[in-house]
Amino acid sequence: MTKTIEVEIYGQRYVITGEADEEYVKRLANYVDTQIRVLAQGMKTATRAKLAVLAALNITHQLFQAEQTRKEGDAEIDRRALSLMESIEEQLEPARKR
């Protein structure tokens, strides 16, 4: 069911229309707001547009880092699973020869 959710990011109100959970959308907006405010503290003359682009870059960087960490974790799980399967096969081999 489509609903309308109003959020505020860096003093600007936005109306979001969609099917996402309202609390989730508000958490997203709060995260973006926080990212922009942190940037704004270090940049006294930045425009809203510049802050928004820099926040988008920072959030995208965080996303890419999380994705890389997930991929590395998946590779480690695959490596461990293969090692475990090889170990099990080594243990079963003498039993098969009997």
Image (cartoon, rainbow, N blue to C red):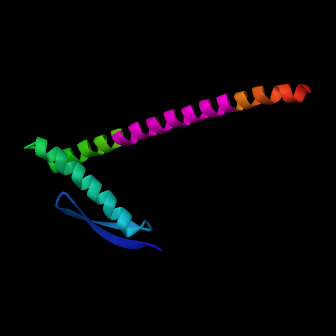
Answer left or right for 84 relative to 41.
right
Quadrant where the C terminus lies?
A: top right
Q: Residue furthest right?
A: 98
Q: Where is residue 14 in the image (x, y as percent from the top left)?
A: 26, 64
Picture layout, residue 81 above or below residue 44: above
Q: Give yes or no for residue 71 being in the magenta stretch.
A: yes
> Could you tell me which residue is drawn at 55 percent across and 32 percent down?
76
> Could you tell me which residue is drawn at 61 percent across and 32 percent down?
80
| Residue 55 picture quarter | top left
| Closer to us: 22 or 83 | 83
Q: Give yes or no for residue 39 being in the magenta stretch.
A: no
> Could you tell me which residue is drawn at 39 percent across and 37 percent down?
65
Q: Position of residue 62 (x, y in %)?
A: 35, 41
Q: Where is residue 97 in the image (x, y as percent from the top left)?
A: 90, 25
Type of secondary structure dominating the magenta stretch:
helix
Answer left or right for 49 relative to 66.
left
Picture layout, residue 3 above or below residue 13: below
Q: Where is residue 26 in the image (x, y as percent from the top left)?
A: 31, 64
| Residue 7 picture quarter | bottom left
| Residue 28 picture quarter | bottom left
Q: How many marks?
A: 0
Q: Identify the magenta region.
A: 62-84
Q: Residue furthest left?
A: 44
